[in-house]
């Protein structure tokens, strides 16, 4: 289930840089062409030389500038989104809850790469049941997977932000 509030907050923060890039596009490409007659030619104004440069630009350079502004804003938005998500995950307090290991599973995935080489990826998945009889599935590494057995009861430590992040399972007893 999607948390719409988190989704739109992330989208808002990710696309703030687009507004900055759009403003830069206006300032450096569009506005100088509009204001070229506002400065005195004899004064030797620095902005006048900049304006003359942009006035002499042809249409293809203008399109290139707008295109590059758009592409750089998309890249900057992606970097901001990744940084925001990493910040949110790292700043969250972990959840500690009593749980029981109910199932373990090893999943494999194979895929072909260029040159006909087949690669295999292995995923270790553990299902936990909480005291309120709800279950959650976590992906763990091989070492953690080997230290857990079905029926183990203990404290599960995890974070949840857009997906589940397993941190640790402290075994208290076996059933």
Image (cartoon, rainbow, N blue to C red):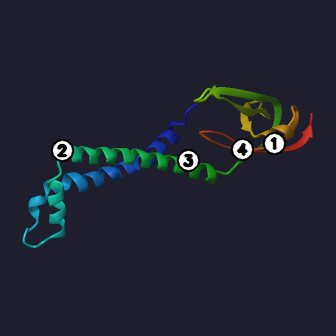
Q: Is residue 77 above or below residue 132?
A: below
Which is in the foreground here, disc 4 or disc 3?
A: 3
- Give the residue drawn at x 8%, y 68%: 40
Residue at the spot of label 2 = 59
Mark 4 or mark 3: which comes first in sequence? 3
- In the rendered image, residue 11, in percent from the top left (x then y), is placed at 45, 42
Mark 1 or mark 2: which comes first in sequence? 2
Which is in the foreground here, disc 2 or disc 3?
A: 2
Mark 3 or mark 1: which comes first in sequence? 3
- Image quadrant containing the C terminus: top right
Q: How many marks?
A: 4
Q: Are marks 4 and 3 in contact (CB under 8 Å)?
A: no
Mark 2 or mark 3: which comes first in sequence? 2
Q: Separation of disc 4 and disc 1 at Cα? A: 17 Å
Badge 1 marks a residue whose secondary structure is: helix
Q: Separation of disc 4 and disc 3 at Cα? A: 16 Å
Q: Decide if residue 107 is on the left or right side of residue 75.
A: right
Badge 4 marks a residue whose secondary structure is: strand
- In the rendered image, residue 92, in percent from the top left (x then y), is placed at 64, 51
Mark 4 or mark 1: which comes first in sequence? 1
Residue at the spot of label 3 = 85
Q: Separation of disc 4 and disc 2 at Cα? A: 55 Å
Mark carried by residue 158: 4
Q: Separation of disc 1 and disc 2 at Cα? A: 60 Å
Which is in the foreground here, disc 4 or disc 1?
A: 1
Q: Decide if residue 164 is on the left or right side of residue 37.
A: right
Which is in the foreground here, disc 4 or disc 2?
A: 2
Q: Are marks 1 and 2 in contact (CB under 8 Å)?
A: no
Mark carried by residue 143: 1
């Amino acid at each position: 289930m999607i948390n719409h509030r988190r989704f739109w907050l992330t989208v808002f923060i990710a696309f703030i840089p687009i507004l900055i890039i759009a403003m830069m596009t206006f300032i450096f490409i569009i506005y100088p062409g509009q204001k070229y007659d506002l400065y005195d030619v004899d004064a030797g104004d620095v902005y006048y030389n900049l304006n003359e440069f942009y006035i002499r630009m042809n249409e293809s350079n203008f399109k290139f500038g707008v295109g590059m502004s758009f592409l750089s804003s998309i890249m900057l938005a992606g970097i901001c989104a990744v940084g925001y998500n990493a910040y949110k995950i790292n700043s969250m307090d972990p959840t500690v809850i009593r749980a029981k290991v109910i199932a373990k599973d090893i999943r494999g995935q194979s895929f072909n790469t260029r040159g006909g080489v087949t690669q295999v990826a292995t995923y270790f998945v553990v299902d936990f049941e909480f005291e309120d009889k709800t279950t959650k599935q976590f992906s763990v590494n091989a070492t953690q997977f080997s230290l857990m057995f079905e029926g183990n009861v203990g404290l599960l430590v995890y974070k949840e932000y857009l997906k589940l992040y397993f941190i640790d399972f402290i075994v208290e007893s076996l059933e």
